[in-house]
Image (cartoon, grey):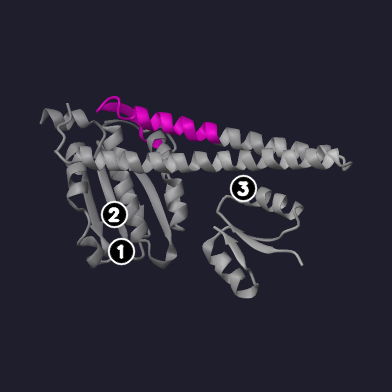
Amino acid sequence: MKSRLMLVDDEEQFVETLSERLSMRDYDVTTSLTGEDAIEKIKNYNLPISTI
Amino acid sequence: MVQKPENTSETGLQFFGRISASISHEIKNVLAIVNENAGLLEDFTLMADRGKPIDPARLKLMAAAVQKQVGRADEILKNMNRFAHSIDETMAEVDLNQTIELFMALTDRFTAMRGVKVDLQLPENPLTILTAPFFLMNLLWLCLDFSMSASGDEKRVELVVEETENSVLIRFRRLAGLSEALLETFPSDREKNLLAVLAADLTAEHGREEIALRLLKNLEEKERT
């Protein structure tokens, strides 16, 4: 099973690029550009790791 | 020569520090994006070593992303340079439209962080005034900071510049959350000292949901009186 993690940052380009790199390393990455959106997503997913 | 009340230097330094810190944060963001693109490029080359060909279209996109960030950093540094030079001369002739556009670019991150949208309405033609540019931007920041606090749930501020015969009026409108309680804290001594330096007036009425800053077009006129 892939490790799941969430990236939260308001820099869209940064989040997209880092997400792509982590996906290449077989992580299941969820991204958010705002704290509010991140909190909503955390409610719906079982995320053991968050990088903020 | 503009006479400065004592604590305008401290207020000015705080403002300068705040803007400088924000600029350094923005530059760090640019570097982080460039760094991740360099890392991604490295990942692609490692994959190419293992026999997976690199997609030229993908490389083109990455080059464009890096170029975009270089352009962004260039703009940030140009603004930083203009801001740093705004204190070279205490009094200078400036185009108010350009000064306000610079001010908006410098404070864009603060408004975004607070989720406030600022609608800017400037006169069509250049509006030349003789003023103290750094102190003017400092006062504009204090007014904008207050206006964001007074924007209420709407989270929207209209910044409107109007020209009259001898003065200019800078209005911060649509302050849906402006209350008498908030107006007990504003203007404080910080704003009053800057108003004195700029020979400016500030009016605030919660019923009209706006604060208005009136500046002389020629600060030397005040100096002569």
Residue situated in front as seen by the camera: B50 or B71 = B50
What is the x, y in percent for residue A50? Answer: 58, 62
Which stretch appears magenta?
Answer: B73-97
Residue B164 in sight here: no
Relative to residue B7, is residue B65 drawn left or right? Answer: right
Tell me the element at label 3: helix
Q: Residue at x 64, y 74 (%)?
A: A44
What is the x, y in percent for residue A33? Answer: 58, 57
Relative to residue B103, is residue B210 drawn left or right? Answer: left
Within the image, what quadrant is residue B52 found in? top right
Q: Are dots 3 and 1 on a single chain? A: no
Q: Residue at x 45, y 39 (%)?
A: B24
Instruction: Name the residue beneath numbered marker 3.
Output: A14
- What's under tag 1, amino acid-wise? Leu
Query: How far apart are labels 1 and 2 at the CA level?
Result: 9 Å
Q: Is B163 part of what is drawn in magenta?
A: no
Instruction: Name the residue beneath numbered marker 2.
Output: B211
Q: Residue at x 60, y 37 (%)?
A: B69
Q: Is B82 part of what is drawn in magenta?
A: yes
